[in-house]
Amino acid sequence: MSAPFFFGAPGRNLFGLLHGREDANPESNQALLLCAPLLQDGIRSHRALWSLAQTVGQYGIPALTFDWYGTGDSGGQDIELSLPGMLDDLERASTELLHRGEVDSVQFLALRSAALPLLAALERRVDPVEVVLWDPQLVGATLVASWRGQHRQQLHGSGRYVNVTHESDEGELLGFGATDALLDALSALDAAHLKLPRGSRVRMAVWEMDEELDRFAREQRAGGVSVEAVLLDEGERPEWNVPSRFGGQVFPRRAVAQLAQRMTAQVPW
């Protein structure tokens, strides 16, 4: 069962899709809130996140996917996407899931760039949290630089515009309106410096460990946070930054299945 609905504050409607079972009350006291990545990755990963949420929901764990304000089917324009707004969206989505899922707590999952606003929001909490980071992008300056690099590739190096000189409008990034305030706020974030509440648990599902992930794990562990990593099948790793494939859906089936099995405790982390 997937039930669409709108929620949020007056004038700031958010679109949500709650996944669960029709034939029974929730079998778990914990729900799952899935956070989509930003800009083009959010569109490309829609099917993967929907499939993961649907599978988890079928096991009796309420799972909520939602659109940030200014994206997807939520209210607002793309230029209204902001870091403070995303922090507010996360709090409202979490509260809504607790109510609609009839559960006691929420576990969070963020894919790629969604890790930064999620960790920034959870840093403000007092009680321990449970987080799954799927292929996270953890350094905002690196993230924004990669978006700008891909933007140049799409304009001039991908073959998208044949025998035509094309320049994007001011403020456009990868086909989206992205304000300087948003990009500056994201650039200032470094997940290694975002301190989660002591006693929190972070599980990273990645195709390969690197120095950025290692540094994040070291800093969080130093603050009393448990950090574990699960390696996904390298042969299925998406080619996120290949210019010629930039518009295609990304649906790594085995990775989705691995995550679903772990989120539903069929397979231990």
Image (spheres, rainbow, N blue to C red):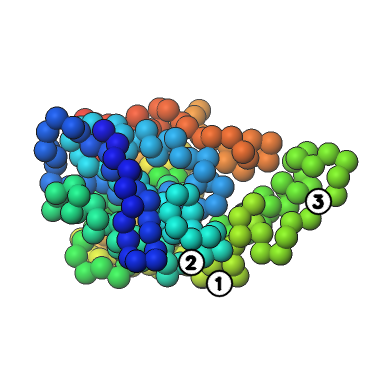
Q: Amino acid at mark 3?
A: His
Q: Are marks 1 and 2 in contact (CB under 8 Å)?
A: yes
- Dot 1 falls on a residue whose secondary structure is helix
Q: Amino acid at mark 1?
A: Ala
Location of the N terminus by quadrant is top left
Whether residue 220 can be seen here = no
Q: From mark 1 to mark 2, how far is it between C-alphas?
A: 7 Å
- Residue at figure coordinates x 64%, y 57% from the top left: 173
Identify the residue at the far front of this view. 10
Q: Which residue is mark 1?
A: 181
Image quadrant in which you'd find residue 63: top left
- Residue at figure coordinates x 42%, y 70% from the top left: 84
**Is residue 120 or residue 15 the one in the foreground?**
15
Image quadrant in which you'd find residue 269: top left
**Is residue 245 or residue 219 the one in the foreground?**
245
Whether residue 111 can be seen here = yes
Q: Amino acid at mark 2?
A: Ser
Q: Which mark is residue 166?
A: 3
**Is residue 123 or residue 101 the one in the foreground?**
101
Using the image, determine if residue 224 lies above or below residue 251.
Answer: below
Q: From mark 3 to mark 2, how far is it between C-alphas?
A: 27 Å
Q: Are marks 1 and 3 in contact (CB under 8 Å)?
A: no
Q: Which mark is residue 110?
A: none
Q: Which residue is mark 2?
A: 82
Earlier in the chain: of badge 1 and badge 2, it is: 2
Residue 20, position as x, y percentages in the image: 23, 37
Using the image, determine if residue 86 lies above or below residue 56.
Answer: below
Residue 134, position as x, y percentages in the image: 40, 45
Residue 184, position as x, y percentages in the image: 56, 70
Q: Is residue 130 left or right of residue 158?
A: left
- Residue at figure coordinates x 21%, y 61% from the top left: 128
- Residue at figure coordinates x 49%, y 47% from the top left: 42
